[in-house]
Amino acid sequence: MFGCGFATIGFKVSNNLCWLLMNSGIKVFAPASVGNVAVGFDIMGFALEKPGDEIIVRFSDKPGLRITRITGVKGSLSYELEKNTAGFAALQLLRHLGEERRGIELEIHKKLPIGSGLGSSAASAVAGVMAINELLKRPLEKRELLPFALEGEKLASGDIHAENVAPSMMGGMVLIRDNETLDFHRLPTPRGIYATVVHPHVEILTKDAHNILSDTVPLKKFIQQSANLGAFIIGMYNSDIGLIGRSLQDVIIEPQRAGLIPYFREVKEAVLKAGALGCSISGAGPSIFALSANSLVAEEVGEQMERIYRNANIEHELYYSPINQEGAIKF
């Protein structure tokens, strides 16, 4: 076995070839995700096609995992494995495989804004574990990587929530029945469904978004929310666009958090008038998502979102995407 981690089978590997194999690296992309999806607080999410995070890994002659480069975040992420979502998740996988002493370099290219409500930490964790798995010739199946990605997400959020990690890894619209056992299920997506997401450049502290929530829910609201969630799932299975639109109403979480996001109510009113099926907060915000029956409506919805934030002189990004069915991929 050579230092670059490749065995010979009846031939000699030259130093130049070994160097090439060590330094070319493997690149993985993990997409952003929309959590909660209005009616599924902490239990439902879906993947977008973009934006997302990219991670490059390669073998090294120096033992152990090291983060060698981070781009896109202007120094706001740590190079220490124990303090970095991607690095910590990757390290947990290596320990599970008994490969923690294997020399590996990891580059993180953050193309997903931090604190956006688009599953930034989940995407980093997913990309980290998938990149390591690909570099080591896939010792685990994709689904088996989820517990290690969740460890990275826990480092960032302080708890285990799979509604961003699971869709970012596996793709699709995902329902989490139980986080501890990772009992999750992909919902079918009707043809043509398109998402529009706006990310206004305003800061919402995660602790504020959590602390504002009440621990008690009125029975009437619980019944209504349960009915909306059940009807949404039926609508997805039956490709009933009308039912999906009638069901995308969050009567519990959104009313409590809406005030944290500038112009949220104006955006929601405008995009519903433009034909969106539904509109709500992505994760803890400040991003706002809308689902539409097709890409043409999604574009009109995006124009309305941009108009409001442009008139308010609030910088923002706008994303259009079908439901990403692949999740994390190797380039």
Image (cartoon, helix red, strand yellow):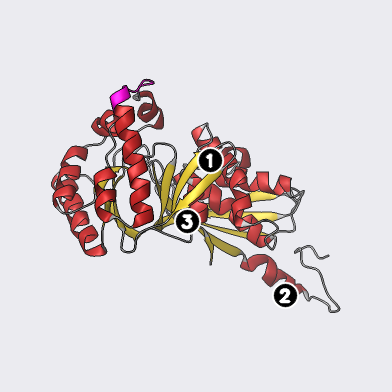
From the image, tell me which residue sits under label 3. 171
Determine whether the residue tagged by mark 1 lies in a helix, strand or loop.
Answer: helix
Camera-side residue of 157 and 202? 157
- Seen from this angle, which residue lies furthest bottom? 11
Q: Is residue 215 magenta?
A: yes
Q: Which residues are magenta?
A: 214-220
- Seen from this angle, which residue lies furthest right? 10
Number of marks in the rendered image: 3
- The amino acid sitting under disc 2 is Leu
From the image, tell me which residue sits under label 1. 153
Camera-side residue of 231 and 81? 231
Name which of mark 1 and mark 3 comes first in the sequence.
Answer: 1
Direction from residue 120 to residue 128 in the image, left or right: right
Find the distance from the CA under tag 2 to the CA under tag 3. Answer: 36 Å
Please tell me which residue is depicted at 48% across the width and 61% down the height of the picture. 326
Find the distance from the CA under tag 1 to the CA under tag 3. Answer: 17 Å
Name which of mark 2 and mark 3 comes first in the sequence.
Answer: 2
Number of the label disc, if any, that sits on residue 17: 2
Residue 235: percent from the left, percent from the top?
33, 51
Residue 259: percent from the left, percent from the top?
24, 31
Residue 151: percent from the left, percent from the top?
59, 40
